[in-house]
Image (tube, helix red, strand yellow):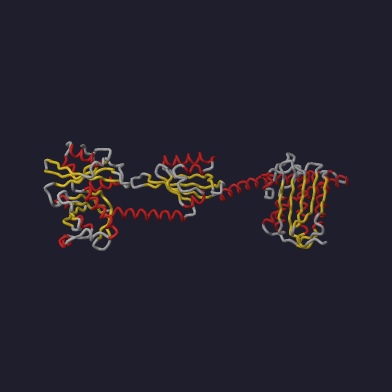
Amino acid sequence: MTFAVSPLAASPEALQSALRLALDSPMPMGVAARGSMDLAPNAALAAALGQGECASLRMLLEAVMEGRLPHGAVLLELPGGRLRLTVSPVRDAGGAIAGALCVGQPAQQDALGRLGETSLIGVVRYHQDGRVIDCNDAFLSMLGLDRADMARGLSWRALTPDEWVAADEASLARLSADGAVEPFEKEFYHRDGSRVPVFVGGAADQDDPGQGVCFVLDVSAMRHAERAFADMEAKFRAITNAMPQMVWSTLPDGYHDYYNDQWYQFTGATPGDTDGEGWNGMFHPEDQGLAWERWRHSLATGEPYEVEYRLRHHSGAWRWVLGRALPVYGEDGAIRRWMGTCTDIHEQKLTQDALRVADQRKDEFLAMLSHELRNPLAPIRTAASLLPLVNGDSARIEHIGRVIARQTAHMTGLIDDLLDVSRVTRGMITLDREHVALRLLADEAVEQARPLIEARGHRLAVADHAGHAMVHGDRKRLVQVMSNLLSNAAKYTPEGGRIELALELDGAAARIAVRDNGIGMSPELAAGAFELFRQGKRTPDRSQGGLGIGLALVRSLVQLHGGQVALHSEGEGKGCTVVVSLPLERAPAP
């Protein structure tokens, strides 16, 4: 038989409890695990046994752990006297024998002895009828009692709350059958009325089975620590679940073992699905590499973790989130945990992207505006320089005047468009509303746009299906809307194209549709066609002209009239259709 200080580190909880009692007991005690004949003795038993081979003890341990004997005892002749070792099985939660408990008792002693009196563990000599025959000071102290109480007589049954009576009776039955009982948990009353949680284990006296010795371990501190930990964990969960962010935590090696409710609500995952490395599958495939690279770097260096990635929402959509984590250090400077958060920044990310694109469009617009304003200045400057040279030549003076007038009119139109957009976007425009026939608006718009349409050789068709429909709005502005749409169609349709202006009724709304078979738009451009500073590709000679703010102005003016505007194109080279819907003033006349 060899002895080890503690070979039971990976043993069942039943053996661990027995080992704790043995190692802290002043009485000779030891624990052996089934499958290994190494005995883990406490100091008292190790001192008594020495390092010699105890064949009789080995044989008894084997018989008890293999179930061939319910229990047994061996009397050892040692240099310091005779020692009776009682061996009883220790069973796990399922009832299977996990090992054996050895309890030693000097054969010549009937009292607890001085060794028991100096122990921090309660040692009690008991009788099954409830009498406490003797006990050490440690037992009295843990219950708030003293020697005077002992002199008056103590009953371990009277000290036991009613709900633990069944556990005591079961242990007494095991004592009667096996001669010993493995440690079990119960409570004793304290003098102040409170309860003391304890572990109790014991063995019956070989000479008088009605009495024996038990060992009582106060586990109040352990239970208090467990409650404190449970309270702390409950507070932690309450705090993290009250946060609007997703919160997660990992072990020092990065193993994810906690997520708050917001994580599961956002992702739609079920608890356990994303433990360990399961979280990686929630990331967009294009973002997984970066997330892993940053996370491994943080684990290796202890540096804070921060990365933006797309996380799969429970709806199936990908949403941008900001992931952050910080290490939590222990007193020894080692990382105990990582605490992290995921913040939904999807809307912020889209806004940033939109602002970046808008800023780029603004720069492109300003560059284009400088060209548009500079183009008419060149002929004006040239014409002005020729005036001193054509003194008296009325024909040339008239030609120069027409050039200057035409170019200044073009510049005025550009500036007027800019001013219109500025006034509308700042809410500084006032509508001069009146009842006006829809067909009258269409005729005036056609009149304004006809020169450009004819100059490019387009065919214009007007289809009036609105009858005598009336709208209530600013006549000048509504004509401006239609004229802009017709002019746009003329500019972006190759020469000899086809343009249609259709007036229709749709319930309580009047519909104005302008269709062309021009250059069309890509889906991306069509989706943002009404945005300010948004313009499609322009030809190298910039033959279309204009600032590209016409559709933005159209949308603003239509919305001021309580209407809506939409654009549809099948794609580049397939033409466009723009539809304006305005509320009717009244039903058309019969």
Q: How many marks?
A: 0
Q: Nearer the viewer, residue 47 or 371?
A: 47
Q: Quadrant of the N terminus?
A: top left
Q: Is residue 230 left or right of residue 321?
A: left
Q: Nearer the viewer, residue 5 or 488?
A: 5
Place of residue 536 in the rendered image (x, y in percent of width and height, measured from the top left): 70, 44
Question: Which residue is rendered at x = 54% and y = 40% of the image?
Answer: 285
**Residue 545: x percent and y percent?**
75, 45
Name the image quarter holding the C terminus. bottom right
Residue 519 position within the rendered picture, expressed as x and y whole percent measured from the top left: 74, 42
Residue 333, horizontal then vertical, whole percent: 35, 45
- In terms of depth relative to the viewer, which is nearer, 367 or 3? 3
The reply to whether residue 378 is visible in this rendering is: no
In this rendering, would 93 be left or right of 346? left
Is residue 327 something that shows in the picture?
yes
Task: Tell which of 202 and 44 is nearer to you.
Answer: 202
